[in-house]
Image (tube, grey):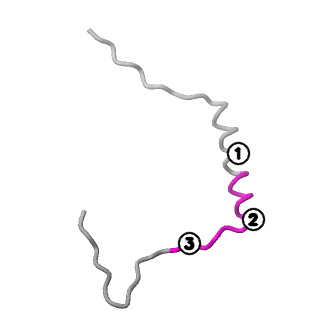
């Protein structure tokens, strides 16, 4: 992967806008709902390799 040089007059620094309290609550509720639904399903583990 190479290095990207910034052209003159261009700034590659990206700043996201801060989340509102409503956005944080919606994200938190979504994560809690997702975890509650997926924890009931259980985890599928790949079969371990058997040595011959």
Q: Is residue 52 left or right of residue 33?
A: left
Residue at the (28%, 78%) spot, across then down? 5
Which residues lie in the magenta part? 15-29
Tag 2 secondary structure? helix
- Would you place residue 7 above or below residue 36 in this image? below
Residue 27, horizontal then vertical, whole percent: 68, 56
Say whether marks 1 and 3 touch (CB < 8 Å).
no
Residue at the (70%, 60%) spot, across then down? 24
Dot 1, crowdedness within 10 Å: few (<14), some or many (≥20)? Answer: few
Tag 3 secondary structure? loop
Residue at the (40%, 78%) spot, across then down? 12
- Marks 3 and 2, how far apart at CA: 15 Å
* Front in this rendered view, residue 9 or 24: 9
Residue at the (61%, 73%) spot, across then down? 17
Residue 32 image label: 1
* Residue underneath mark 2: 21
């Amino acid at each position: 992967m190479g290095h990207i040089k910034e052209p003159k007059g261009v700034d590659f620094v990206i700043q996201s806008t801060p989340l509102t309290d409503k956005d944080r609550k919606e994200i938190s509720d979504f994560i809690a709902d997702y975890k509650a639904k997926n924890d009931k399903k259980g985890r599928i583990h790949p079969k371990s390799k058997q040595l011959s």
